Amino acid sequence: MFALIVTLFSCVSILRAQASRPEAEKQLAHDLYKQFIEIQSGYTTGATTPVAEAAAARLKAAGFPDSDIFLGGAIPKKGNLVVRYHGTGARKPILLLAHTDVVEAKREDWTLEPFQLTEKEGYFYGRGTGDDKAQAALWIANLICYKQEGFKPDRDIIVALTADEEGGGPYSGVQWLIKNHRELIDSEYALNEGGWGESLDGKKISNDVQVSEKYVVNFRFEVHNKGGHSSLPVPDNAIYHLAVALEHLSNFGFPLETNEVTAAYFQQMSKIENGPNKEDLAKAAAGSQEAMTRLAAASPSWNATLRTTCVATQLEGGHAINALPQLAAATVNCRVLPEDSAEYVQSTLQKVVGDDQVSIKILGDASAGPASPMRADLLGAINRTTEKIWPGVPTVPMMVMGATDGKYLRIAGIPTYGVQGIFFDRNDIRFHGRDERVPVQSFYEGQAFLYELVKVLTKP
């Protein structure tokens, strides 16, 4: 009996050790995380170059030669970092990607300083804690650990920290690297953000792996009017036209549908869920519209998985407090299913609005990317590593409801998979929102998971 107890205790200790790296490695990851969070790299007001330079300094201090570190970007303040850890070359490299820009955060909107890493009540708070500086810090920390261990992979491991994911545009780091330095990031496949662990009420449900994603189409709703003096109001008011158009939008839902990836996701989730949605998940995977309708009503994330969504995100209008508005406009951000074309979305919105005074124009890029193959070797490795760290937690393929830089890599011929091993409560996702946060324990478990996964994918 004593021997059995000792054996069981040892097994439990091993499992716990697998879910966390040694203290020195955890401290390195924490220090990088703090350093990255506290560099203001807002998409519109900040700079990513200081983050790239900070990572480069850490790598050089750990013994990486200058020849293996690249710093550069479209403009001086939008810098990217690419570092290569050399293997035997028996297989093509893998690329580990994270972006270092963040959505803007106003201090008056937050209860804590957004550009300061704050640990409070079991969470790390700060802009970018989840999107995407946790993964950036963990890739660099783990790469340094491989170097210190003398690990010799059978393929090169490339880490790229990039600019301007949170809005794309002319300074997008991934697009700039693909166009100007493809040789630096050319790889068999990439691991990126866009997948995460789902938990509910403290219980881990699944480790979701992104194999496809929606794409972003931004529209500008615009109403022009001759205006006039505010003392002589008339029903033909630009703001009123826009308000009615947005009300129509708020009451509209695009059709519900599944594709290969989302059907697989719902089928897998039906085996995991034990609540009232269990049967509907299986029925939705089989194409039941009634089940999809109930799931869409039950969860914002399921609703976004099942349809194209469009939402107003910015408003502007009027030019004086005592004048009738000559312009009223709104930005409408759409997250579009890969199967839906931008032209289809635009024509649908025009029908929904039903007002020829409201013009609807596409802003910027509106291209979709292909899905990545659901390759058994990679998903199997993720599943085995997940089981090692969190026994009993399944790996589930998913289509992410947002959009990532993975689209550009897939278009360029580099299959990309979103995987982090950082768990978030499915009802408390704060990316882009106020008081963004990551559970402290989950950050360190993610470190252990990514450390093990990359080794599994690169060891001889």
Image: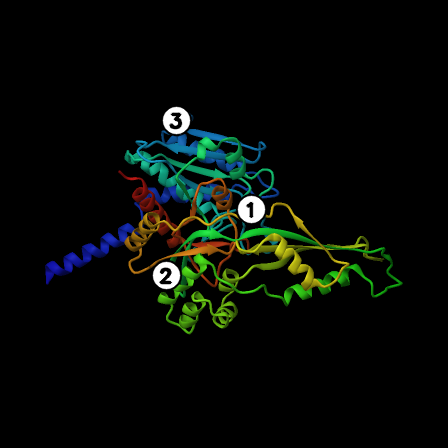
Residue closest to the eye, 427 or 278: 278
User: Looking at the image, which residue is at 46% across and 55% down?
Assistant: 399
Residue 95 at least partly seen:
yes
Q: Secondary structure at mark 3?
A: loop
Residue closest to the eye, 170 or 76: 170
User: Looking at the image, which residue is at 20% across and 55% down?
Assistant: 11
- Residue tagged by mark 1? 166
- Residue tagged by mark 3? 65
Residue closest to the eye, 11 or 158: 158
Quarter-wise, where is residue 29 in the image? top left
330 displayed left or right of 158:
right
Q: Looking at the picture, which amino acid does disc 2 mark?
A: Lys
| Crowd around label 3: few <14 · some 14–19 · many ≥20 (10 Å) | few
For the residues marked 2 and 3, what is the alpha-carbon distance in whole angstroms?
40 Å
Residue 337: image location, x then y, percent: 53, 56
Residue 455: image location, x then y, percent: 31, 42
- The quadrant of the picture occupied by the N terminus is bottom left
Foreground tag (1 vs 3):
1
Q: Secondary structure at mark 1?
A: loop
User: Looking at the image, which residue is at 46% across and 40% down?
Assistant: 413
For the residues marked 1 and 3, what is the alpha-carbon distance in whole angstroms?
31 Å
Decide: is 375 above or below 170. Answer: below
Q: Looking at the picture, which amino acid does disc 3 mark?
A: Pro
Sequence order check, earlier mark of 1 and 2: 1
